[in-house]
Image (tube, rainbow, N blue to C red):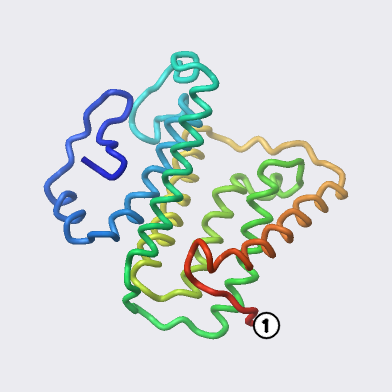
């Protein structure tokens, strides 16, 4: 049984290979953050895009009507929250083990890249010409966010969490492009529309800067 008791998807039991079971046992708390990107993927692929579950190698039809819209939204939200909680608790439960040394420029670059990632996150849900330049702004933002944290953190838990999320986002974009075919760019919007994502991203960056020590256990300081 995996964390949160999820060993089946859509009623189909998933046999866990022995090497994976051994990996869980050897990683201990690390498994919580190694497994969390899978929960995140399940929510965004199987729940959020049921018709596009070819990424998982299976067809799923009628997910929302079968369980009801409100239940669907509730399960989706709970899955995302559970994934994030697992990541945070798994992260904080592990003693950092150095793999490489982060440089001073890495810290400075990370702070700027997190802002870029937030702009991409926000723009994905608002009218923005960024969506004419970047096909998957939210997933691209996750890649940038993960890379930023790998520049600033050289320990094993960072490689497991941020490396796993970044790799998942890259694979998700590849499989989605393959599924959807040619990219049909959205219509252009007025340049004034770009101000809102920038302002929201700036406010979110400032808020994250101050609350980061409370949920991640790591204090931040401006590197530039």
Q: Which residue corresponds to mark 1?
A: 224
Q: Specify whether 96 is left or right of 77.
A: left
Depth order, front residue of 167/72: 72
Establish if 4 lies above or below 164. above
Q: Percent from the top left, x then y, of residue 128?
A: 76, 45
Choose between 28 and 98: the one closer to the eye.
28
The quarter of the picture where residue 126 lies is top right
- Graded by Cα atoms within 10 Å as few (under 14), some (14 to 19) or many (20 or more), the crowding at tag 1 reads few
Q: Is residue 142 left or right of residue 90?
A: right
Q: Which quadrant of the figure contains the N terminus?
A: top left
Q: Is residue 178 above or below residue 85?
A: above
Q: Residue furthest left?
A: 18
201 relative to 139 in the view: left or right? right
Badge 1 element? loop
Instruction: Give percent across and percent down for residue 61.
Output: 43, 17
Residue, far front = 214
User: What residue do we see at 28% from left, 55% from top?
Assistant: 31
Q: Is residue 95 left or right of residue 129?
A: left
- In front: 157, or 59? 157
Q: Residue at x 42, y 42 (%)?
A: 41
The quadrant of the picture occupied by the C terminus is bottom right
Q: Residue at x 60, y 75 (%)?
A: 109
Count of number-bearing discs: 1
Q: Is residue 62 above or below residue 194?
A: above
Q: Position of residue 95 (x, y in %)?
A: 32, 72
The residue shown at (37%, 74%) is 155
Residue 145 occupies which quadrant of the picture? bottom right
Image coordinates of residue 26 in percent, x first then y, are 17, 61
């Amino acid at each position: 049984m995996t964390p949160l008791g999820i060993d089946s998807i859509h009623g189909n039991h998933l046999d866990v290979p022995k090497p994976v079971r051994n990996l869980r046992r050897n990683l201990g708390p690390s498994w919580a953050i190694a497994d969390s990107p899978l929960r995140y993927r399940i929510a965004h692929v199987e729940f959020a895009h049921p018709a596009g579950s070819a990424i998982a190698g299976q067809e799923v039809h009628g997910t929302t009507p079968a369980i009801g819209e409100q239940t669907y939204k509730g399960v989706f939200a709970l899955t995302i929250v559970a994934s994030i909680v697992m990541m945070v608790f798994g992260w904080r439960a592990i003693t950092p083990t150095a793999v490489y040394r982060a440089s001073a420029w890495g810290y400075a670059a990370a702070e700027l890249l997190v802002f870029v990632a937030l702009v991409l996150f926000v723009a994905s849900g608002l009218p923005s010409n960024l969506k004419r330049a970047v096909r998957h702004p939210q997933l691209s933002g996750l890649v940038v966010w993960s890379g930023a944290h790998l520049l600033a953190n050289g320990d094993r838990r960072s490689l497991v969490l941020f490396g796993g999320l970044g790799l998942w986002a890259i694979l998700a974009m590849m499989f989605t492009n393959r599924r959807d075919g040619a990219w049909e760019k959205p219509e252009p919007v007025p340049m004034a529309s770009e101000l809102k994502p920038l302002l929201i991203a700036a406010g979110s960056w400032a808020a994250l800067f101050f609350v980061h020590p409370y949920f991640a256990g790591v204090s931040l300081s401006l590197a530039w």
